[in-house]
Image (spheres, grey):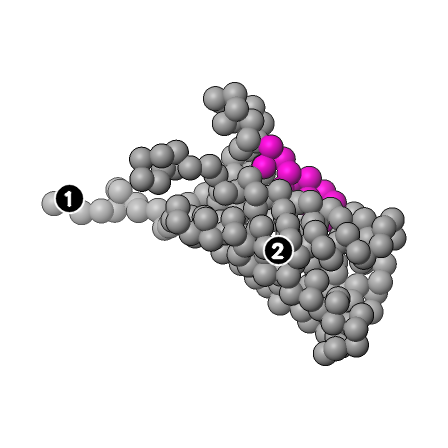
Amino acid sequence: MSHNGAIAANPAVVGLGGFGLTTFLLQMHNLELMSTGPVLWVGLIYGGLAQMIAGFQEQKTGNHFGYSAFVSYGAFWIALCMLLLANHFDIFVSSTTDIGWFMLAWTLYTAMMCLGAFRIHGAMAFTFLTLLIGFVGLVIGHFGAPIFNTIAALDLVVCAFGAWYMMTGIILKDVYGHEVLPMGKPWLKDLRPQTDLAATPAE
């Protein structure tokens, strides 16, 4: 894309990077491999602030999908980190069930975004499908079946690598001047109704 005649970088490389890295770190915490600290600070700065900035840059390109995804998931990370901090300091405490409802709301949003992701390309579709599965697992886990939190964590590690794959693909395409990592075909065809040309009266 260009702005005032100059070539501008693709903001998705930051948005995808922030989403992937923060998602990966949170799952390391959920798998009890690390403490909450790094998740909070990276979530606020990279997964939250940087991803939101990338989303606002997408708005300038006219990319509705990228705009919605990066700003919304950036807000998700900021909200989640503030929720955890508030619980730690006993301010507006959220119960496990409260967090389950929080995750359910994001599950519904992600399900709607999947309709767009499945139309973009295979890598985007795969990443959003694993994200949706992960959210569903977290919802079930927070409503009384904790084993699903572990299952969701394993799934979301795969999701993180899906985001990183797309980020790397965009960067390598710019560096090498051609596609290095294939993104795959869209999973959904055009949703517009097909016109039956044989049934269309001649003018």
Choose between 94 and 180: the one closer to the eye.
94
Compared with 142, 15 (above or below) is above
As measured in the structure, the alpha-carbon distance from the residue carrying label 1 to the one carrying label 2 is: 56 Å
Indicate the position of residue 101 as horizontal and vertical percent values. 69, 71
Which range of residues does the magenta coloring cover? 156-168
Q: Is residue 9 above or below residue 32?
A: above
Q: Could you tell whether 138 is left or right of 200 in the image?
A: right
Amino acid type, callout 1: Ala
Residue 20: x and y, percent? Answer: 66, 45
Which secondary structure lies at badge 2? helix
Which residue corresponds to the image point at 64% horizontal and 53% vertical from the top-left? Answer: 45
- On the picture, is 129 further left or further right than 33? left
- Neighbor class of circle 1 (other Cα within 10 Å; few <14, some 14-19, many 20+) is few
Quadrant location of the N terminus? top left
Disc 2 target residue: 48
Left or right, residue 95 beside residue 115 = right
Disc sitting over residue 77 in the figure: none
**Mark 1 near mark 2, Cβ–Cβ under 8 Å?**
no
Query: Which x, y percent locates residue 188?
Result: 50, 44
Identify which residue is drawn at 30% across, 45% down: 196
Which residue occupies the extreme bottom position in the image? 92
Q: In the rendered image, which quarter contains the C terminus?
A: top left
To which residue does mark 1 refer?
A: 202
